[in-house]
Image (cartoon, grey):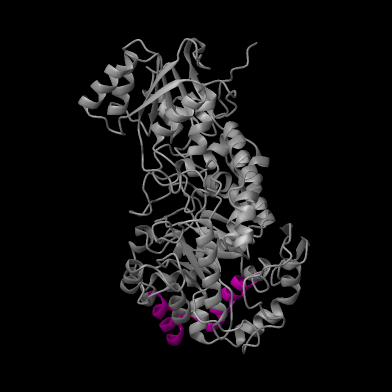
Amino acid sequence: MHDTSSAEGTGRPGQPPHPVQAGPATGAVRPSRRSVLAATAGLTAALAVQGTGTAQAASRHDDRSLRSLISRMTLQEKVGQLFVMRVYGHSATDPDQADIDANLEEIGVRTAAELVAKYHVGGIIYFAWAHNTRDPQQIADLSNGIQKAALAQPRGLPLLIATDQEHGIVCRIGKPATLFPGAMAVGAGGSAADARTLGRISGAELRAMGVNQDYSPDADVNVNPANPVIGVRSFGADPDAVARMVAAEVKGYQSSRVAATAKHFPGHGDTAVDSHTGFPVITHTREQWETLDAVPFRAAIKAGIDSIMTAHIQFPALDPSGDPATLSRPILTGILREELGYDGVVITDSLGMEGVRTKYGDDRVPVLALKAGVDQLLNPPSLDVAFHAVLDAVHSGELTEARLDESILRILRLKARLGLFDHPYTTRADVTRTVGTDAHLRTADAIAERTTTLLVNKGNLLPLSRRSHKRILVVGADPDSPSGTTGPTTGVLASALTELGFGATALPTGTAPSAAVTDQAVAAARDADAVVVATYNVTAGSAQQTLVERLAATGRPVIAVAVRNPYDVAQLPAATAVLAAYSWTDVEVRAAARVVAGRVSPRGTLPVPVQRADDPEQTLYPIGYGLSYRRH
């Protein structure tokens, strides 16, 4: 995926008993923990809470009161509840003119408040590119403004406010919020406790900013090194290890009252096609799916996952029709609902992605998704087209209103579990108290230090000595910085090494250095004691590979830091040392620098196998491989 009025919140018609509060909560008691217990068919999950807010929400808004509320909703309100939509702007009521123009062009409204009033949407998704996420206080104000607009409507329903805060290479909210290592890095660390801590802290910061649903964790098992869309967003290639991390992160988010989302069902880990731009086909057999792809999703369901996101992929062994999983009743109802016993919220991946639009038009996709078993329709290209398509399908009898009611009940149950009927707002004090605190930042650094993986260390070059290798040249790739990190990568590495006592100079060479740029780097290397190269998805015969070979030919030791896929190591035989950082975010790059300097020992191990470059059928480094500085 691109990834109001001031009416009081009480006494409105159609409100369930114990109405929502009217404005931002300043003194509300915040529950410190919650865990979702197993749900039985037709019953709302029971909630065990230390604190008051969510426990009260569960008792006040049981199925009977929620069904009563649904019975009083208009058809338009019901249809709206099914949609989660993007909107441009930093403010719910007063965005910049450019964002007003974008909203008018794409959605036909001026502001988020108008979007809520016109289409009755059940959720909003935040993106950095939509200018929703300037800074934590602004995000909290935007969230409160959106909730205020929603509560001013006749039914006064709070919204699910969501974003893709996976950490690593996919983050919509950046500094000064705490940014953690991504999933594959956490997988390399191997600590379920760290995964749970990540979820707990990330969840607490999101909730403080008014974000109550996170499209994370990624439950895909990445078994294809060429996967262009998942890769390091996955915890790894071992389904049991991925399952352990997914379940832990889910529990962490739940403890902070944020709905976690396992994605992308039924499993997006073995594809060489990006579903944003194409229509991938997964060729696993049903047996392979059971033992590989399904394992983390089963674990997520057992952990009480709040929502599951669908994949825009063909999976012929599960449904031979050629439909994407997002539109497949055999997959979403037959397998996810009936076989796996999942009765939580099912949300589509973005309906603007090519993978779901290849076979059907934008007017058919939302209707077919609902018929397949979906509850939330995420980010359609045209909300007006999608909204009226669902409305027309009910009028024609293709969809029944009872079918809509099933999904709305699941959505409202989730909102009740999150305590949104009682505490829909956040406060600026919550943001100050919670987001990007020193304790959170230190925890992120500590987790990152446990993830860096040392794969090659010829002659025990590392840890690098400040006496014999004082002058360091840092070259390599500076990919576009993930949201809100400092960047560029070479600059962050050089700065970190300088702070650690080296004299480091950055000379960016890019992902495809020209001959002239390579010559410049080689010349500069002759004045250095060692060279650090940030590599990014190196391929055989590529300019990055040539750069490393030519730098090594100078006789200077070359330390490669793979800042995305760990598979780079197979293409870098000339390097003296190779580390995998799994992302080019600051927290992971700085941790790699501390490993190079010997401030910490490398502790990460590969969560995926690396195949030989000359024979991909042979394993160069297996899952679990990783060197250390400990001497025997």
Above or below residue 415? Residue 456 is above
- For the residue pair 60 and 354, the one nearer the viewer reads as 60
Q: Position of residue 243 (x, y in %)?
A: 61, 45
Q: Is residue 91 magenta?
A: no
Residue at 68 percent across and 81 percent down: it is 19
Quadrant of residue 391 within the rendered picture = bottom left
Q: Is 590 situated above or below 70?
A: above
- Image point (57%, 60%), residue name: 209
Q: Which residues are magenta?
A: 386-413
Nearer the observer, 122 or 309:
122
Image coords of residue 518 (percent x, y): 26, 24
> In the picture shown, does residue 299 fall above or below 362?
above
Q: Quadrant of the N terminus?
A: bottom left
Task: Name the dominant secondary structure of the magenta segment.
Answer: helix
Name the residue: 61% across, 47% down: 437
Observer-nearest of 10 and 541: 10
Image coordinates for residue 520, horizontal then vertical, percent: 25, 22
Total marks in image:
0
Residue 432 shows up from this direction = yes
Classify residue 396 as left or right of residue 213: left
- The reply to whether the magenta stretch includes residue 409 is yes
- Quadrant of the image containing the C terminus: top right
**Residue furthest left in the image:** 516
Q: Is residue 448 left or right of residue 29?
A: left
Q: Is residue 339 visible?
A: no
Residue 530, position as x, y percentages in the image: 40, 16
